[in-house]
Image (cartoon, rainbow, N blue to C red):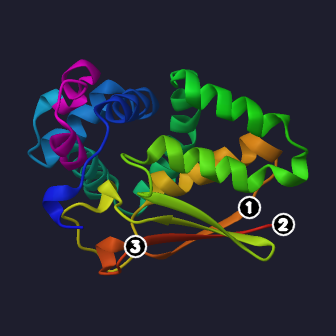
Amino acid sequence: MTVSEVLFSPRLLRQFVETLSFEIGSQNLSAVLEKDNLPAEWSSSAQVNRLDDKRAAEVYAGLQSAMRTYYGHGARGTLLRIGGKLWERVLNDAALGVRAQSALVRGLPASMRCKPALDLLARVLSYKQGDITAHTLDLDFLFVDHVSPATLGQKNSMPICYVTQGLIREALYWAVSREFDIEETSCRAVGHNNCEFKITAGG
């Protein structure tokens, strides 16, 4: 997929900006943008909600890049937390089909919920079907983002998809009230084809 084809839902971007602003504070968010010479309107959920899908992907990546610049090594923990909080906001603001699917997941026996929960997360985050896939690896799982808007235009020596990792962690905890070991084993920002997250059961 070329850079021009990376698209992201403005609705999801709005939810991300709302979560980001709530978690770090609107003044801190303004400081993050100012340090990276980014537009002040990126802190406005109403403004970003009106962006087109291509621009929304650029802003989603740009905001996370600015957070890494501003917070340095501390950005990882902050973005993981924001990803976790974003899951709750996304579910609360979800369309009827997603709410129905979430109810089905929670209605399953606990031992059967993990893969369906990951499928639900993939559906929520995907711009179109197949952008993100979830797979079973014996007792473990693999979550594969084939597009990863967070990495758009980004180059790094280490994986950077902390928000996605936080979303995975919280979606699984929501499903089964358990913690899992989650590692991003490949990342498009590093030069890999996909962003892949290995999820180890019993972590």
The span picked out in magenta is: 42-58
Q: In the picture shown, does residue 84 fall above or below 118?
A: above
Most foreground residue, 55 or 128: 128
Q: Given the image, on which type of amino acid does mark 3 rest?
A: Asn
- Asked whether, in this view, residue 200 is left or right of residue 190, the answer is right
Please name the residue that numbered disc 1 is placed on.
Answer: 180
Check disc 2 and report its element: helix, strand or loop: loop
Of marks 1 and 3, which one's residue comes earlier in the chain?
A: 1
Of marks 3 and 2, which one's residue comes earlier in the chain?
A: 3
- In three-dimensional space, the C-alpha distance between marks 2 and 1, rounded to whole angstroms, equals 6 Å
| Place of residue 189 in the rendered image (x, y in percent of width and height, measured from the top left) | 30, 72
- In three-dimensional space, the C-alpha distance between marks 1 and 3, rounded to whole angstroms, equals 21 Å
Residue displayed at 45% across by 50% down: 79
- The label shown at residue 202 is 2
- Asked whether, in this view, residue 82 is left or right of residue 44, the answer is right
- The label shown at residue 194 is 3
Q: Mark 2–mark 1 contact, CB under 8 Å?
A: yes
Q: Hey, which quadrant is residue 21 in on the image?
A: top left
Q: Quadrant of the C terminus?
A: bottom right
| Place of residue 31 in the rendered image (x, y in percent of width and height, measured from the top left) | 22, 37
User: Magenta stretch containing residue 179, yes or no?
Assistant: no
Q: Would you call the spot at circle 3 few (<14 residues within 10 Å), some (14-19), or many (20 or more)?
A: some
Q: Would you call the spot at circle 2 few (<14 residues within 10 Å), some (14-19), or many (20 or more)?
A: few
User: Magenta stretch containing residue 56, yes or no?
Assistant: yes
Of marks 2 and 1, which one's residue comes earlier in the chain?
A: 1
Q: Quadrant of the N terminus?
A: bottom left
Most foreground residue, 179 or 132: 132
